[in-house]
Each structure stands twice: as structure tokens, then as C-alpha cells.
Amino acid sequence: HAAKRERRRCRVAITDAAFISDLVGPIGQHKQPVFVVMTKDFFIITHPGAKEVSDQIPLYEVTNCAKMAGHSEVSSSMIAFVMDTMEGGYNGGRQYIFSVENEDQFVAWTQAINQQVIISTKLFRNLSKLQEAKERARSVLKTETWQLVFGIFIVSNFIVNIGQACIAPNSSSSGGGDSTNSKIFYAFDVVFTTLFAFELSINLFGNWLFPFFNSGWNTFDFCVVAVSIFSICYPGGPTWIIVIRTMRIFRIIRLFRKLRALRAIVSALFAALPIVGQAFVLVTLVAIVFAVVGQALFSKLSPHYFGTFKVSIYSIFKVLAMAQWGHVAEAVKDPRYGENDVDPNATLFFVVLIVTCVWILLQVVVAVLLDNFTSSCRREEKQAIIDDEEERLRSLGLTKAVTRSPLAPLLDNLALFKTSEDLSSRIQKLFEVLDCDRGGTLSYSELSDGLRKMRHFSPIIVLSQDDFHRMTNKGQLCDEEGCLTPEQFEQILREELELHMEGKIQTVYEELAQAGTQDTTALLASIKLLKMMVRLNPPTHLHPPLQLAGGGGVGVWGG
């Protein structure tokens, strides 16, 4: 409530102001009216009639907010204030200048901004310290020493659990007992539970909250530790508590996450379970159908096996498991047929059941399991190779060279276009978003800052000056002032998108060539050959002048 009151006190109502520019170009030409509003963390800028935020300044990155004076292109009668931002921050050290109508507005804005900057900076520093502590916790969890120590604890706990089951089997259900052995094993249980709870607390703190529970291994750790704590706090109890308490033995499975080979097998198995589960549902449905049919046919002949639906479905699963299914078949035999004779109804029923479920559907389940298991194992092995290479380079103080375009996240989004007109519309919308001052052109600073602020892309797009020179062919594709017009911007993005898609085709081609899938490899090779032929003999009629499509195209900026 105090924070809400402070936010209400410091928030400035939406007000008209004049946005001068960031002193990059001629200020007099770029001066335009804008709407600005300050929240508890951001100073937000938008243009009249716009449907999205044009720019925003994190208040905890504002280094100065004061009156603007002494600039050659700022009139002496104009009242303006300047906001300086942090170098390397969200706005990259950019300077913003705003003019207001009178002195009262200047005082109101600057006082409110400076007050909220102090509050936001304090909150940000506290959050920064918390993030630093979380990063330390995550780094500690990844160290080899930590992994080795707790791996030893897991194995030791497993050996103690086996010894407890052999020497004092009743201590696990009584939570201690009067004997010396029971007390010793109970003490071991308390010690191991405390150690694992300590590890879980650090893991939970470093990966709070959704990143922690998004990992299946972390969720499993949480359940096992919670059951262990519950068993210590409530010794003895009813049968269901005893059953839950025995789950402590599953702590040994946590060792799988620390051993790469076992982790790969378990991860591949769990990755294959969803599809296998769908196949198993089909087997279950067919078994239910046979249970209903069996109950209708044999309920009077053998109520012990097919008297009710529950008994019938249980008998069907015994047949599918090949567990004494001959006794079930003999029990439903019609008495009219002799000992050496065959009941055609029972024979047909069990033959169809075994052929359909055991010989066909269960084999399908196994085939699906193996297919998905091998695919998952290949992914795990590929990721393991990548991790080993990165670890080797890191130990040598090297970094793997990556030829990926800095615009790759944006190009992946643009690659979803349907037609050429749709692509032009997307690029035009992107240009409007990046053109913060509505000057009709994009400078390097505008393009670089705008792309870096699109935080919904992963990784964040960082465009260097060298990247800009490469894309513009050392400035030849820019205008006289070194800026990009909408047509030049579209031409550059189309060329970058073409190169990006060629790189993707090459990557897929190499992967499929290694996998040995000849048909798809031949298809991609044909595409590459066709591309080479087009480059050698470019048909001029396929490259008309660029036309910007009008209308409301789908934007690529998340605001």
C-alpha cells in the first residue's frame, strides 16, 4: 500500500510535450509533439495517434535530469529539460530533450522525475543485489565439487536405506523405535534429510520460481525432500503415511542427473512417454472392449473371471500379460464340449484378443517407444557433444566462432511471411516502429537502439557499427546523411533474409547428410543447385522495383 501511495504521488498525468530529439540530427527538423507519461519504473514516450509505445526510459537508468541550456539550435526562449541515460543500459547512453510550455511545467516534471528516479534506483539496487545472490547460488550448484559431494551423499543415503531394510525393517514404519539400531537409522535419516533440504533451498532460491519447477528433476527433488520431511515430522501413522515414507528410497534416482549417461537415458525415456502414452491408451480402449464382450459371453460360464466388469478387465490384462491365461481359457469353456474338444466361441475370442492386442498393438507401443527413445538419445548425445566442446573451449579461454547474423531472431520472425506483399508490410511496420522521431529515415543509432529494445527476441539483437557497414555495403545503400530510407531498409532486410534462409538450408543439409536420409538430402541438394543456377543467370523480370504494401500488416514488434 505504501508503494501504491508513493506511485500515485509521483505519477504525472498524461501531458502534451515537445520532443526535440537526441541531438543526432538537425533538431529543428525533428521537433514533433509527443505524449509522455511516467510510471513508477518507466518514462514512456509515444506519438499522437500511435497504437504502440514509441520509446521508454527506465527511471533507474536515468543519470541526470536538469534544465537544458546553451545548445546552438535551442532557442533561448524555449524551456527544455534533458534526460541522460546510463551507458550500456536499455537506452545505450542516449540523451533525450523535452521542451515544455512554461516554468511551472518544467518544475513539476523535473521534480517528479528526480523523485521517482531516486525511488526506482533504490528498488533496482535491491533487486540487483538479490539477482547477484541468485547468480552465485546457481554457480555454486554447477560446480564439480558440489555435484561430487552431494552425489556421495545420495549413494550413502541409498546404502543406509538398504541397511535399514535388512537390519531394522520396522524402524521405517515406526519412525525410530526403542532399539539402538532404529535410533541410529532415524538419526541418519534426519541428517540426510537436512542436507538434501539445504541443497533444495539453495536451488529453489537460485531458480525461483517457475524456472525451478519447469525442470522435472527439480520437481522430483522437491517431492522426495517433502516426503522425507513429512516422515520425520509425523513418525508412525496410518498405512498411507508408511507407503509415502518408503518413497525416500527414490533419492538414488537423483544421482541420474549428475551422471550424463544415466541422465541421457532417463531424459530420453521421459521424452518418449507422451507419445507412448497415446499408444497405450489405444491398447487400453481395445482391452476394455474385449472385457465388455467377454463379460457378455462368459459371465454365466465363469463368474470368477468374467462375472463383473472389474473382474473381466482384470482377467483381460492377465491374458495380455500371458499370466496363466490358459486357466482363464479353460474356465470359460462350454461344458457341452468334451475335454479333448475345442469351444469355438472361447477359441475365437482369445485368438482375436491375443493377435490384436499382444501381437499387433503392444508391438506398436514398443516400436513407438524405441523410435522416440532413439531420437531422444540422438538429441541428448548431440547436446552432450556441444556441451563438451564449449567446456573444452572455456577451459582454454577460447570462444567458438559463430557466423550467425546478428539479426537472426528478427529474420526468423520475418521468415513467416506468406507473400511478398506480406513481407513488405511487415518490414514497413518494423520501420515505423524503429523510426522513433518520425523523421522518415533510420540512422545507425536509431536502428541499433530500437533493435536492442525488442526484448521479446532471444537472444537480444545487438547490431554493431561493423554489422551496419556490412549490410549497407560500407554506406553505399544509405542516403547522403548516412541514414536508411524505407526502400533501402526493405532492400537490406530482404537480402539479409535471403542469406539467413540459405544458411538454414545449408545447416539442415549437413545434418540430414550425416543422418543418411537420402530422399530429403537429395531434395535440399536440388534446391541448392536451383539457387546456384538462378544466381548465375538472374532473370531480370523476377526483380521488379520494390513496392511497399499498404494496409495493416502483421507487426513484428511486441511493444
Image (tube, rainbow, N blue to C red):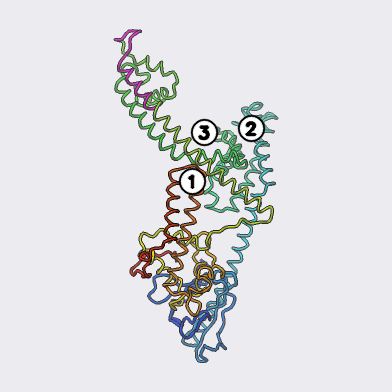
Q: Classify residue 290 as left or right of residue 168.
A: left
Q: Residues within 10 Å of mark 3 (few under 14, many from 20)?
A: few
Residue 75's tag is none
Q: Position of residue 45 (x, y in %)?
A: 46, 74
Q: How many marks?
A: 3
Residue 9 in sight in this render: no
Q: Main secondary structure of the magenta part?
A: helix
Q: CA distance from mark 1 to mark 3?
A: 52 Å
- Dot 1 corresponds to which residue? 512
- What's the residue type where badge 2 is placed? Asn
Q: Position of residue 8 (x, y in %)?
A: 48, 72
| Quarter of the figure with residue 286 | top left
Element on which disc 2 rests: helix
Nearest the eye: 166 or 75: 75
Residue 356 in sight in this render: yes
* Extent of the magenta region: 336-357
Q: Does 347 appear in magenta?
A: yes
Residue sitting at 54 percent across and 65 percent down? 462
Is 553 drawn above or below residue 359 in the view shown? below
Q: CA distance from mark 3 to mark 2?
A: 19 Å
- What's the residue type where badge 3 is placed? Trp
Nearest the eye: 426 or 326: 426
| Quarter of the figure with residue 233 | top right
Is 332 drawn above or below residue 447 in the view shown? above
- Dot 2 corresponds to which residue? 161
- Dot 3 corresponds to which residue? 240
Q: Position of residue 323 (x, y in %)?
A: 45, 20
Is 325 drawn above or below residue 2 in the view shown? above
- What's the residue type where badge 1 is placed? Leu
Q: Position of residue 404 (x, y in %)?
A: 53, 59
Nearest the eye: 473 or 449: 473
